[in-house]
Image (cartoon, helix red, strand yellow):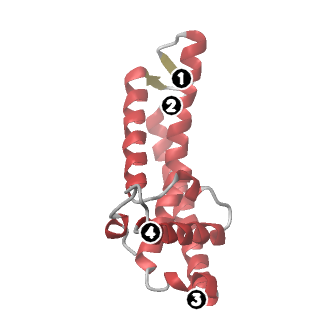
Amino acid sequence: MSTPIINIFTYGLPFKLANQIYKEFQNRVKEANFLVENSARFKFLSDYNETLELLIALSIFHKRVVSNLDGAVKFYGTVNSISKADTISMGSYDLTFEEKNKILALLINYRTLIKKFGISENDFDYTETKEFLSNIKRVKSFDDYDERNDKGIGKNIEDDLPF
């Protein structure tokens, strides 16, 4: 007999997941603050603690939530193209064509938003915090490049970025 989805919440599984994500956030922020304080390479971020925390939170959200939603959309597309199934059942949950489209719309809006701020999904592809800080440094350097960009691509990004 399968366990109804409602019982999963009574056992605290979402809390455990949220707790893991929060601990990852705390650890990354602690490490980032240490690197900013003790490394000349990242000193430029010392005035942007709040922005740094927001970008770390966004990167964790991207890795733990967005990438899984993207995987679900791709999985649905693969299954649908092979079998012409219109619903994928996972336990008591059914992923329908309509839900897949809602997730896809969310992903498109998310990607449009991060692109507006000159952030690439590749910027969230890191294993060590110092890699992430290097990515931020590159994005910040991109700001300076935009003012000289002849094609007008990315104009006014400096006005949009919080640092």
**Mark 4 or 1: the one toward you:** 4
On the image, numbered disc 4 is attached to which residue? 143
Q: Residue at x 57, y 27 (%)?
A: 75
Which of pointers 3 and 2 lies earlier in the amino acid sequence? 3
Which of pointers 3 and 1 lies earlier in the amino acid sequence? 3
On the image, numbered disc 3 is attached to which residue? 37
On the image, numbered disc 2 is attached to which residue? 73
- Would you place residue 25 above or below residue 64 in this image? below
Q: Specify the label residue 77 is tagged with.
A: 1
- Dot 1 amino acid type: Gly
| Residue 84 locus on image (x, y percent) | 53, 10
Front-lying residue, 93 or 67:
67
Q: How many marks?
A: 4
Q: Dot 3 surroundings within 10 Å: few (below 14), some, or many (20 or more)?
A: some
In the drawing, does residue 96 fall left or right of residue 72? left
Front-lying residue, 21 or 37:
37
